[in-house]
């Protein structure tokens, strides 16, 4: 089944609805003649009735197709899906089935991979402060590569690997000094930040020396990740150029040609019609060309390349489905449309001032669009889902509204703020829907909250210092 098997019914949609904007909606999204959105062949009104709202609706075919496209574009390279974008067991399985590798950056993400028996040699472990327990878990599972990020970690991992009697393959995370043109919270190539070893400052060269003499470590390559939500190939090209320069220096200094170069993730996606994402094929062509040319100039064999897309695979596959609860018109100011989710299921608007679009998806609505601000249900005014979006003027309570491009860094960054239960992730495919992450319940929320009344109260012996300070309080 692929995207084209779903007839695009946008042409027959009612006048107010308009066609689905290109690039913004999951590949199988289409509008039925009555204005209802369908994803994966399932109508969203059916989904809302069955699974409730809010809910993340994930187009499985689109996810798999994106994995396959990355593999095709980066043939003979290793494509690591960055699990931080969105990870659950079903997704880990799809990633494995589609032949991708997986980048994990915590013990929790590793646990998901382990729980589906993800092939350990296809795992890569990131993080600037991995704990000893996490490193031990990675070694025990036989994770293919660990990306070391600090001198302390080189010592720590070297000792743990030696103790475990293994030789762990590692990459060194390098800060190439490239400013990616993106939000500064997600920009990681420039010098002044917590990740990696500075190339310009010489720390990267020193890290190479230290790893080479660490007993339990085998240096296989270098890694750089310059940032996220990037729309310009220049930064990737410059980083690749500098990293090959470092490979050449390693060869000159240590008479060693490192076989691997990982250039990270970061490809931007469209959140609104104003974003123009790069084409994966073009990025692949550009990176391979830069690396090929620079290696030829330096007399190096071309290393095996790796990339780590997260957002570009997961982001466009998902829409968040909300129900409208109230519409508040402030004459001369603004119309607020409140939905039943908000900053607990999408923190990106508040955190990065991210822009989103949205549309009415349960009926066509009036032909005339009004400009509204979609807000959530949380107790603060920064709880905005989408600023200034065109929704039909007659939007009203009970309507379903969908926000596209919400597959990456939405569920994975969701919180329980205000004791709101996190929404489910529902995978749709071939006209069928299945829950791959269930909705939290109030019981889930209460499970972690240990009620002192139900527990034995800690006893304090009378007359002790602790007892008198307790009395003083
Ligand atoms: N590799 C490394 C080492 C990373 O740190 C990241 C993302 C990726 C790959 C994947 O990058 P992507 O292809 O998804 O851009 N929460 C932010 C994004 C944080 C990105 C963190 N690292 C957001 O919502 O925009």
Image (cartoon, grey):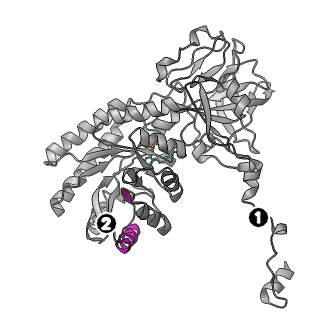
**Most frequent secondary structure within the magenta stretch:** helix
- Mark 2 or mark 1: name the one nearer the start of the chain: 2
Which residues are the magenta region? 144-164
The answer to whether 245 is drawn above or below residue 66 in the figure is below
Q: Residue at x 29, y 49 (%)?
A: 261
Q: Which residue is mark 1?
A: 450
Who is closer to the viewer here, 248 or 432? Answer: 432
Residue 182 visible in the displayed image: no
State the SS at label 2: loop
Q: In the figure, residue 343 lies in which quadrant? A: top right
Q: Is residue 385 left or right of residue 274?
A: right
State the residue in front, 244 or 187.
244
Q: Secondary structure at mark 1?
A: loop
* Circle on res. 167: 2
Figure label count: 2
Is residue 159 on the magenta stretch? yes
**Residue with the most extreme bottom position:** 463
Mark 2 C-beta closer than 8 Å to ligand 1:
no
């Amino acid at each position: 089944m692929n995207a084209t098997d779903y007839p695009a019914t946008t042409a027959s949609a009612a006048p107010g609805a308009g066609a689905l904007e290109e690039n913004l909606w999951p590949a199988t999204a289409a509008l039925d003649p009555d204005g209802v959105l369908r994803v994966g062949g399932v109508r969203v009104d059916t989904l809302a009735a069955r699974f409730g709202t809010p809910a993340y609706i994930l187009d499985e075919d689109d996810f798999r197709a994106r994995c396959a496209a990355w593999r095709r574009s980066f043939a003979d390279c290793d494509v690591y899906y960055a699990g931080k974008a969105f990870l659950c067991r079903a997704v880990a399985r799809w990633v494995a089935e589609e032949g991708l590798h997986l980048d994990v950056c915590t013990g929790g993400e590793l646990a998901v991979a382990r729980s589906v028996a993800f092939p350990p040699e296809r795992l890569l472990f990131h993080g600037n402060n991995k704990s000893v327990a996490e490193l031990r878990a990675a070694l025990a599972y036989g994770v293919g590569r660990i990306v070391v990020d600090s001198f302390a970690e080189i010592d720590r991992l070297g000792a743990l690997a030696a103790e475990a009697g293994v030789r762990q393959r590692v990459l060194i995370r390098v800060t190439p000094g490239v400013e990616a043109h993106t939000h500064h919270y997600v920009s990681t190539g420039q010098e002044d930040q917590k990740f990696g070893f500075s190339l310009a400052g010489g720390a990267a060269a020193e890290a190479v020396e230290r790893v080479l003499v660490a007993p339990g470590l085998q240096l296989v390559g270098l890694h750089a990740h310059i940032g996220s939500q990037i729309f310009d190939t220049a930064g990737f090209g410059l980083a690749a150029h500098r990293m090959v320069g470092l490979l050449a220096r390693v060869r000159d200094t240590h008479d060693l040609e490192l076989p691997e170069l990982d250039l990270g993730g970061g490809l931007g996606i469209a959140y609104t019609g104003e974003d123009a994402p790069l084409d994966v094929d073009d990025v692949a062509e550009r990176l391979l060309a830069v690396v090929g040319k620079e290696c030829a100039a330096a007399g190096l064999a071309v290393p095996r390349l790796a990339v780590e897309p997260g957002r570009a695979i997961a982001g466009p596959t998902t829409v968040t489905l909300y129900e409208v609860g109230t519409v508040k018109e402030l004459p001369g100011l603004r119309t607020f449309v409140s939905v039943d989710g908000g900053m607990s299921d999408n923190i990106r608007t508040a955190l990065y001032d991210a822009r989103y679009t949205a549309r009415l998806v349960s009926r066509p609505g009036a032909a005339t669009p009004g400009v509204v601000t979609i807000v959530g249900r949380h107790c603060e005014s920064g709880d905005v889902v989408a600023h200034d979006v065109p929704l039909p003027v007659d939007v009203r309570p009970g309507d379903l509204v969908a926000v596209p491009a919400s597959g990456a860094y939405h569920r994975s960054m969701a919180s329980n703020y205000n004791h709101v239960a996190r929404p489910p992730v529902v995978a749709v495919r071939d006209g069928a829907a299945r829950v791959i992450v269930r909705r939290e319940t109030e019981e889930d929320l209460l499970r972690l909250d240990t009620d002192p009344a139900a527990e034995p109260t800690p006893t304090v012996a009378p007359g002790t210092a602790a007892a008198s300070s307790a009395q003083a309080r």
